[in-house]
Amino acid sequence: MTRKHWFFIAIAITGALLVSAVSFALFKDSDPYKDFTGLGSSIAISPDDKEIAFSAYQEGEEAIYIADIDGKDVKRVVDIKGKLLHNPVFSFASDELLFLAEGGDGTNVLYSKPLDEEPEQKTGETLHIRDAVFGPDKSIYIIAMKASEFNKEPGETTEGFDLYHLKEGSDIPKKLTEENHFSMDNLSVSENGEAIYYSDFKGENERLYRYSLAEQSVTEEVSAQGLEIEDMYNNSLAPDGKHIAFSAVSEESKESSLLNTICL
């Protein structure tokens, strides 16, 4: 066979591989959890220390479950067909749950569920909910952004996440901040209900912010630089508002990708 023939065969093989690669990229299953069975990404402990709430998949369907604090007596308490349910959170009285329901486009709406009643949708389709928690008075604090802006590529929008407040009995969340955060999360409320805490990246470091309900203002509470470490991740505030737990990379583990958890 001549060199010319080998050249055309090589072109044909390359073209076939290119078509196969493009076809795979276009038609492959975009849902990695389609047939997955196992735990979801978060677990919540009730304030009375009696129960845990978590999401779990059964053959790709994600629902909310409750169990005793020791993991026994597991019960599925809510599932919604066509929605992936996740991020359960207890009320201060341990008698109600908040959770997020994810649709096919990846946006979340917020639901609440008293443990002995049916779930109720709390937000509409115009907002994408990132996180939500109860206040002591059963009002709800929410991290959200416009759903229409959520799936846009970086640079296509200046919209970001902000803090919202939903009073008990209301169906219209009130926007509390105009910060347009890029990665706002780790929402928590102080035990007295006077302050809301959340984290976000500023430059290369994650920082903890405090929103004062009385002053209606945001202050920076803790940053990695103030603690003489490079980074802090996954902030979690204690109910008394005096201690914070977070993950950080120690000097010893910088080359091994290990994370140490530090409590303050």
Image (cartoon, helix red, strand yellow):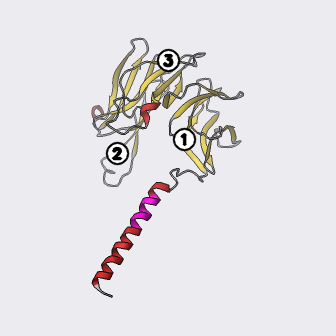
The tag earlier along the polypeptide, 3 or 2, is 3
Image quarter in which the N terminus is found: bottom left
Q: Dot 1, crowdedness within 10 Å: few (<14), some or many (≥20)?
A: few
Mark 2: which amino acid?
Answer: Val
Contact flag, marks 3 and 2 (Cβ < 8 Å): no
Q: Judge by depth and name the residue closer to the eye, 210 or 128.
A: 128
- Whether 46 is among the magenta residues is no
**Quadrant location of residue 102?**
top right
Mark 3 burial class by Cα count in 10 Å: few <14, some 14-19, many 20+: some
Toward the viewer: 217 or 10?
A: 10
Separation (CA) of disc 3 from disc 1? 35 Å
Residue 87 visible to an observer of this rendering: no
Q: Amino acid under label 3?
A: Gly
Q: Going 72% across and 28% down the picture, which residue do you hit?
A: 116
Q: Main secondary structure of the magenta part?
A: helix
> According to the image, label 1 marks what residue?
104
Judging from the image, what secondary structure is the residue with disc 1 in? loop
Determine the CA span between mark 3 and mark 2.
32 Å
Separation of marks 2 and 1 at Cα, in angstroms: 35 Å
Q: Which residue is mark 3?
A: 193
* Boundaries of the magenta span: 17-24
Which image quadrant is residue 6 in?
bottom left
* Residue to which mark 2 is pinned: 249
Q: Quadrant of the C terminus?
A: top left
- Judged from the image, the secondary structure of the residue bearing numbered disc 3 is loop
